[in-house]
């Protein structure tokens, strides 16, 4: 880890970090790397997001599916916690709601392995400032 | 293995299901099967799209076609035309109300532009415990820009130009606040972040700190640079352990990367941030009380002036801003004030985060441009009222705000309109109420909260709110008189006019606004001894219908005070003198013979 001593340092790091981010999103190996974000704010954790995340990590590992499971903040869908966002290679991210371990298993078996959608998708209904 | 080329998404939200979306789903499944398309097309039920006003919604992937107001009979046409022949069914596409054109791709619909995420831009997108993800999203670029390209005066001018106003509730222009703080010179100055989110039902500050802590740290450093402070303090309630944990991680990482600490970006600007934990008192959201609490004193307010800008933490010049206000700052610097001030209304710029709660389908955290109407928030983003009930009121601004009725549904939400309507923005809690909510009880609930949270320093707030609560209690017990209603109004005005700080000055707002908008409901409690919503227990009357009662004795056996008498196989009666209105008989009766009025 290096200290940032100037704005140029930050710009360099930002570029690198962006590449890494892209790598994670658009994956090197488009057939294999799946990216999953679990909404882990207090509300998500209270509804069992931690169990869901642990389960996903273990299950994907057990089945040797290459995936990156990360935590993130509140997605805003408080009525449908725990929520996860799954990004399959070369696909738009899809948000699933009410993901307990049973639902998580279904998502792994159907969506991640067979590209079949499962019931309970939450439509994204906001814009981020990047698109503006 | 089936490899699907197309997906048909049917909305399974409560609103759409009420208009037969289940049948639509079944029809699609049946038709797809009949036409042997089940290897290529998958039919899926989704959660609420939020666009319930135009429901039921059907969306086709991958081309993102968005069909509105679909009927079960339309399924066949959609399959034959769209799925098989690739021609969109025009009459079911969404019609743009302004341009009078059909829009097929939902991404181009105004509805999706109703929510714009500025303060929440990274929430639910980055890993809050990894600084590099924040940096990848242009994190710390704004402080870099300020330190290398702008003078402190220019930063303040930019914030002033943006029109950003305090998101904690007061709505004071942020740039002006910074300018005041920059005018006072001392050997030590402070930047304080107010994370003492105390309104019942509000959780946007917690979500920002949990989801994107670095944006607040960066903004505090920018503020420090522009007012000439090198120390930052975050006052956060101890009830937010996860937010505290993530802030600690964020501060540690920022220091390791040299983005906080001495000589940031090799300049002579240094900035350090520490946390101060509060025990969670509502009054500590008031800036002078907050400062006293941080100093180790009692969390009690003091009269202003002197303002914290002149004499704040440790009697030094201090600038206090709320979490959400800070979260907007880096975007304003990066994208420019002129980008920001194009969003919103004339006097309220940018967006506001609301915590939607209560009797609403999509409880959640939303961020909309200022000027969005309550109808859009409740019926389009929030998905309407639960169980198809009637909308009655929405409470905004927490214990300092008021209730808005359906007359205000089309009022654009901004600071000034809400005040004019008798409520206020507050921190952005929005509690939606339906026909089953009793407005007198709501006022009583908030008053109970205020009585507990009043710090007790000034008489009007300490005694006045207690008396207000007692009058409300008397009314809900059915002992109120018409004189009580006048007294309630007069005392409310007195407390409002004479209290020391914002807590007392706004505390009677829930009473005044419900008195204004729901006077009939108060009168019903006082004169008719009835609670129209059926919420006030003491005003309920349980009666047994002798026609329906078969004399099974279940009610009598379940009554905890033996108020029900009667012989087996004969109609029973309730002695109203003994009855404590617990409702046990009402729940147990299998014959619907007991009425609750």
Image (cartoon, helix red, strand yellow):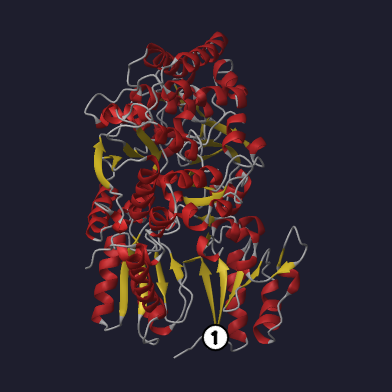
Q: Quadrant of residue B296?
A: top left
For the view shown, which residue lies furthest in the bottom direction? B1
Image quadrant where one finds the C terminus of chain A: bottom right
Above or below B9: residue A71: above
Is B186 or A82 nearer to us in this picture?
A: B186
In this figure, which residue is indicated by the disc labeled 1? B5
Is B48 or A19 nearer to us in this picture?
A: A19
Crowding at dot 1, Cα within 10 Å, few <14 / some 14-19 / many 20+, comes out as few
Residue B436: tell me if it is visible.
Answer: no
Counting from the top left corner in percent of width and height, residue B378 is at 58, 47
Q: Residue at x 21, y 68 (%)?
A: A1
Counting from the top left corner in percent of width and height, residue B223 is at 39, 44
For the view shown, which residue lies furthest in the right direction? B100
For the view shown, which residue lies furthest in the top direction? B483
Label 1: which secondary element? loop
Q: Quadrant of residue B348?
A: top right
Tell me the subunit letter for badge 1: B
Is B218 or B322 nearer to us in this picture?
A: B218
**Number of numbered callouts drawn:** 1
Q: Residue at x 42, y 15 (%)?
A: B470
Above or below B479: residue B448: below
Horizontal arrangement in the rendering, residue B498 relative to residue B384 (left or right): left
Residue A107: tell me if it is visible.
Answer: yes
Above or below B109: residue B500: above
Counting from the top left corner in percent of width and height, residue B64 is at 60, 74
């Amino acid at each position: 880890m290096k200290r940032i001593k100037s704005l140029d340092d930050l710009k360099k790091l930002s570029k690198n970090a962006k590449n890494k981010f892209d790598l994670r999103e658009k994956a090197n190996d488009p057939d294999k790397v799946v990216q999953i974000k679990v909404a882990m704010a207090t509300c998500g954790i209270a509804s069992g997001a931690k169990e869901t995340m642990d389960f996903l990590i273990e299950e994907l590992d057990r089945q040797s599916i290459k995936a990156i499971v990360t935590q993130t903040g509140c997605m805003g869908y408080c009525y449908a916690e725990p929520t996860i966002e799954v990004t399959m290679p070369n696909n738009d991210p899809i948000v699933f709601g009410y993901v307990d371990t049973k639902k998580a298993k279904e998502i792994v078996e159907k969506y991640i392995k067979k590209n079949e959608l499962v019931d309970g998708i939450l439509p994204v209904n906001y814009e981020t400032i990047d698109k503006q | 293995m089936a490899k699907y080329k197309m997906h048909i998404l049917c909305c399974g939200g409560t609103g759409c299901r009420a208009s037969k979306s289940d049948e639509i789903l079944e029809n699609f499944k049946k038709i797809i099967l009949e036409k042997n398309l089940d290897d290529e097309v998958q039919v899926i039920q989704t959660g609420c799209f939020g666009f319930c006003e135009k429901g039921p919604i059907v969306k086709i992937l991958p081309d993102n076609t968005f069909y509105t107001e679909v009927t079960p009979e339309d399924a066949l046409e959609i399959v034959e035309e769209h799925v098989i022949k690739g021609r969109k069914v025009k009459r079911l596409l969404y019609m743009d109300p302004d341009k009078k054109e059909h829009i097929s791709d939902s991404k181009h619909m105004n509805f999706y532009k109703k929510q714009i995420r500025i303060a929440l831009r990274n929430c639910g997108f980055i890993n809050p415990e990894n600084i590099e993800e924040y940096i990848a999203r242009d994190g710390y670029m704004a402080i870099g820009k300020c330190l290398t390209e702008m003078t402190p005066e220019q930063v303040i001018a930019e914030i002033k130009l943006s029109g950003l106003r305090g998101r904690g509730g007061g709505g004071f222009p942020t740039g002006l606040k910074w300018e005041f703080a920059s005018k006072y010179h001392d050997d030590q100055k402070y930047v304080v972040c107010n994370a003492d989110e105390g309104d019942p039902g509000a959780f946007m500050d917690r979500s920002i700190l949990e989801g994107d802590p670095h944006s607040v740290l960066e903004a505090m450093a920018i503020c420090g640079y522009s007012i000439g402070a090198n120390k930052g303090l975050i006052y956060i309630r101890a009830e937010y352990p996860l937010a505290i944990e993530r802030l600690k991680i964020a501060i540690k990482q920022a220091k390791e990367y040299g983005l906080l600490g001495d000589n940031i970006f090799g300049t002579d600007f240094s900035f350090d941030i520490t946390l101060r934990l509060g025990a969670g008192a509502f009054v500590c959201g008031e800036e002078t009380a907050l400062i006293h609490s941080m100093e180790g004193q009692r969390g009690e307010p003091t009269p202003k002036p002197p303002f914290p800008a002149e004499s704040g933490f440790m009697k030094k010049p201090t600038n206090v801003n709320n979490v959400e206000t800070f979260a907007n700052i880096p975007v304003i610097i990066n994208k420019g004030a002129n980008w920001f001030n194009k969003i919103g209304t004339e006097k309220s710029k940018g967006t506001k985060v609301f915590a939607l709660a209560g009797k609403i389908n999509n409880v959640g955290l939303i961020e909309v441009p200022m000027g969005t109407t309550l109808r859009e928030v409740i019926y389009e983003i929030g998905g309407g009222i639960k169980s198809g009930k009637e909308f009655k009121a929405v409470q905004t601004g927490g214990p300092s705000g008021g209730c808005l009725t359906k007359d205000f549904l089309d009022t654009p939400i901004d600071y000034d309109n809400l005040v004019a309507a008798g409520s206020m923005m507050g921190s952005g809690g929005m509690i939606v109420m339906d026909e089953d909510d009793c407005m007198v009880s709501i006022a009583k609930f908030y008053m109970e909260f205020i009585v507990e949270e009043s710090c007790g320093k000034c008489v009007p707030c300490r005694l006045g709110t207690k008396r207000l609560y007692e009058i409300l209690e008397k009314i809900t017990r059915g002992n109120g008189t018409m004189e009580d209603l006048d007294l309630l109004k007069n005392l409310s005005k007195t407390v409002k006019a004479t209290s020391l700080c914002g807590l007392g000055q706004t505390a009677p707002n829930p009473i005044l606004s419900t008195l204004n908008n729901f006077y009939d409901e108060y009168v019903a409690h006082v004169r008719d001894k009835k609670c129209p919503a059926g919420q006030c227990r003491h005003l309920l009357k349980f009666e047994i219908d002798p026609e329906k009662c078969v004399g099974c004795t279940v009610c009598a056996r379940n009554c905890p005070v033996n108020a029900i008498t009667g012989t087996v196989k004969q109609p029973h009666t309730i002695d109203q003198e003994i009855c404590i209105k617990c409702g046990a008989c009402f729940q147990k009766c299998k014959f619907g013979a007991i009425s609750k009025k």
